Image: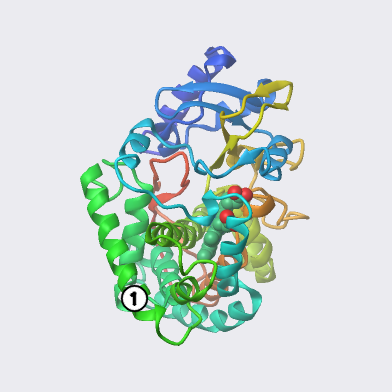
Amino acid sequence: MDDGSVDIKSRVAAEVASLPVAALDPAQPDLFAADAFWPVFTRLRAEDPVHFVESPIYGPYWSITRWADIMAVDSNHQVFSSADGIVLQTLEAKAESEKRPRGSSFIAMDPPGHDVQRKTVSPAVAPANLAVLGPLVRERAGAILDSLPIGEEFDWVDLVSKELTAMTLATLFDFPQEDRRLLTHWSDMFTNAPGHGPAKSWEHKREQADACFARFTELWNERVNAEPKFDLVSMLAHSPETRNLPITDYHSNVVLLIIGGNDTTRNTISGSVYALNKNPDQYDKLRADPSLITSMVSETIRWQTPLAHMARTATVDHELGGKTIKAGDRVAMWYVSGNRDDEVIANPNAYVIDRERPRSHLSFGFGIHRCVGNRLAELQLTIIWEEIMKRFPTVELVGEPTRTHSVFVKGYETLPVVIPRRN
Ligand code: HEM
């Protein structure tokens, strides 16, 4: 590799090996951007799986790194509440967010509020609607792939991963397709800290959030008194559980659905191209037997882990792994680490597209907040790969990706590829 990442990785590995375990802190966006965080998790899983950190960036939090402990936290919403937010928030972001009135989305709620709102939007991603969406996604995937240059380098993230997920999300919201890339843009504005991605400053982030909210308020106003339709805005505007909520809660649910529907699937699509190129024997296996697409998709979701963690707040003092987590303490469940726990997954660092139980991973979470869009994500990934295999013998990685500067969204900003020829 010529991008210097090997140097960074070996430097971080040496540093991590030399530090006392008490000093380890996985929540460092620089390490995620350099893909250099893995040795931190390997040590924490082995030596201190329930680990207290005083982070200069995020404040104090507990870092949970083993599969079994993550499951214990994720499936115990009585003790581990989502109401104070579900990501590690930088101290700076926290101070910023306190300057403005805030709403709450259902991912950041406990029962009963969570349950009724989740139920409101679930039909959009339930099997009956997926059967309707499938042919649409296939048609669009085909059109995207047919428009790609042959024999010329291009950015897979931009031309494929973002395009397909933006089209699907625009359909779910019944948002004008010609403006679909606004959804991608807003998602990037919400998830990036100032100075990263498209976000230049806090003011820029606020401005763009306001533009997003204004547009979605217009859609609400158009639909609230119209005949109910089968899109996410109409569902929220017509359901007795959500129609009378403060507008800030509606906006927060929009943010949840934009991020949920965008970044995760996008980064898995990019991750599949990256992983298959880094593991050519697996790409050969897939070419020899395209029926492996389904398990390849799940293996990529595990291997990539597009959301590196989810966070909770303890409601009472609670014992976990011999430590006492105090009421009010923040807790980060590192899915990215749990998915590499060799007590549960054999040879977890390897990318193996025909694993026996490929859906056995933590990437969609567990318990009452388990990803509501998981089948839609799998559907898009399966279809794009079915259509890729029909058209191209290979999608070739021609350089290293740039990675997202985040401890939450684990993904790719760019991924340079060439498609040498069609089938
Ligand atoms: C590979 C793709 C995806 C991954 C890895 C992913 C991951 C996750 C995770 C980790 C959670 C939280 C689970 C927990 O706290 O236990 C979640 C929740 C959620 N996801 Fe996804 N997601 C993906 C795709 C999608 C899609 C396509 C949508 C589409 C609309 C979506 C919508 C949501 C929503 C609304 C929630 C909140 C559920 C709740 O609080 O009950 N996700 N997702």
Specify the quarter for ligand 1. bottom right
- The residue at the point 74 percent across, 21 percent down is 322
| Dot 1 beta carbon under 8 Å from ligand 1 | no
The quarter of the displayed image where residue 6 is located: top left
**416 or 81: nearer the viewer:** 81
Residue 279, can we see it? Answer: no
**173 or 98: nearer the viewer:** 98
Q: Secondary structure at mark 1?
A: helix
Total marks shown come to 1
Quadrant of image for the N terminus: top left
Amino acid type assigned to the residue bearing label 1 in the image: Asn
92 lies left or right of 59: left
Describe the colour scheme in one phrase. Answer: rainbow
- Disc 1 residue crowd, few under 14, some 14–19, many 20+, Cα 10 Å: few
- The residue at the point 68 percent across, 22 percent down is 324
**296 or 178: nearer the viewer:** 178
Residue identifier under label 1: 221
Where residue 167 sits: x, y (%)? 41, 73
Work out which residue is located at the far bottom of the displayed protein and give it. 227
The quarter of the displayed image where residue 245 is located: bottom left
**Vertical comparison of 303 with 243: above or below:** above
**Vertical comparison of 337 with 256: above or below:** above
81 lies left or right of 342: left
Work out which residue is located at the far front of the displayed protein and give it. 244
- The residue at the point 52 percent across, 69 percent down is 393
**Vertical comparison of 187 with 167: above or below:** above
138 lies left or right of 103: right
Residue 109, can we see it? Answer: yes
